[in-house]
Amino acid sequence: MAIVVIRQDDRIDLWKNALQNADTSVKVYSYLEEHPKEEISMAVIWKHPKGSLADYPNLKCIASAGAGVDYIFEDDTRPKNIPITRIVDPYLASDMSEHVLAVILAHLKNLNIYKLDQVSHVWEPKQYMRIKDVTIGILGLGELGALTASDLSSFNFNVQGWSRSKKDIEGVQTFAGAEEQKEFLNATNILVCLLPLTPATEGILNKELLSQLPKNAFVINVARGGHMVDDDLIALLDSGHLSGACLDVYHTEPLPKSHPFWNHKKVHMTPHYASVSDTNSVIPQIIENYKRLSSGEKLQNLVDSDKGY
Ligand code: GLV
């Protein structure tokens, strides 16, 4: 039994070494080095090259190195009948919550507009908003969405949340299902998307949904680029229905240089870095699952393949 790490970014050696150092009795390989493919029982992956998982005849578990698993389901050549696990980690949730809080406060106080004004040497004081003036709506109340909602509520924001099935979160008014979505959207001034990306949520941030937000609403997408219909967002920003958007995720990452978001004054971009798995914090749960796999115990943080998250 052994682990292979498959990812195409510059963190592959960091992950390989962190897994190796966490348990020196486990054999860990990078997919880029010579390695015995028939020995591999667990693949620890992040945005792997499509097709690469089919190389391992004895694979018993696919472990996503992040909270999201949408990119695994997009690979039709993946082995279909083995468990998929994902990361559930307090830092992944609290980093996201802190990011969303920072974006919301920057929006209330016009900080991004002032940065643009500074570049053009413009002195133009603007009306700011207060926490009590806005209602935050969180789309998706999983691990990250639920913590973000309750943290914002503890800062005295009016917070409401929408999810597929009803959730109870102290201090947060919750809505569920298609029939309660309109009421939720109509009262949301700042919409935060923290949904998993599945066939049911792909393109959910479209003209029809975003038009149900009140005029001057602000949109934050920290989930996946696939949730957003980019042209619909731009049309609603340009028509003045939406006052702005802060995006961390895109259909193609890095975002192609020719994409209109780059030069749009109402779009504030960050490079998919709102919340990133911290190896020190998340490696123990992967090693624990590797041990459980060896002893035939039930794995932690299993993904429901029917739901896709
Ligand atoms: C980041 O996007 C993650 O899914 O962990």
Image (cartoon, grey):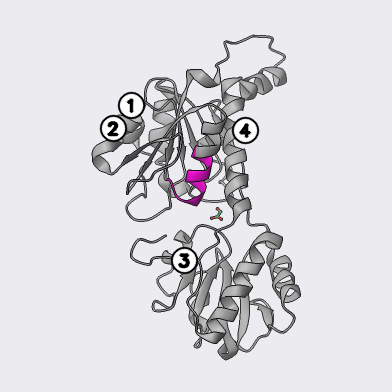
Nearer to the camera, 117 or 129: 129
Nearer to the camera, 155 or 249: 155
Q: Look at the numbered disc 1 and give the secondary structure of its residue.
A: helix
Residue at x-position 63% and y-position 57%: 277
Q: Is residue 259 visible?
A: no
**Residue to which mark 2 is pinned:** 182
Q: Look at the numbered disc 3 and give the secondary structure of its residue.
A: helix
Q: Position of residue 256 (x, y in %)?
A: 56, 46
Q: CA distance from mark 3 to mark 1?
A: 34 Å
**Residue to which mark 4 is pinned:** 102
The relative height of residue 196 versus residue 83 in the rendered view (above or below) is: above
**Residue to which mark 3 is pinned:** 72
The mark lying in front, picked from 3 and 1, is 1
Q: CA distance from mark 4 to mark 3?
A: 30 Å
Residue, far left:
179
Q: Look at the numbered disc 4 and give the secondary structure of its residue.
A: helix
Q: CA distance from mark 3 to mark 2?
A: 31 Å
Q: Amino acid at mark 2?
A: Lys
Label 1 CA crowd tier, 10 Å (few <14, some 14–19, many 20+): some
Magenta residue span = 141-149
Q: Are marks 2 and 1 in contact (CB under 8 Å)?
A: yes
Identify the mark nearer the N-term, 3 or 1: 3
Q: Are marks 3 and 2 in contact (CB under 8 Å)?
A: no
Identify the mark nearer the N-term, 4 or 3: 3
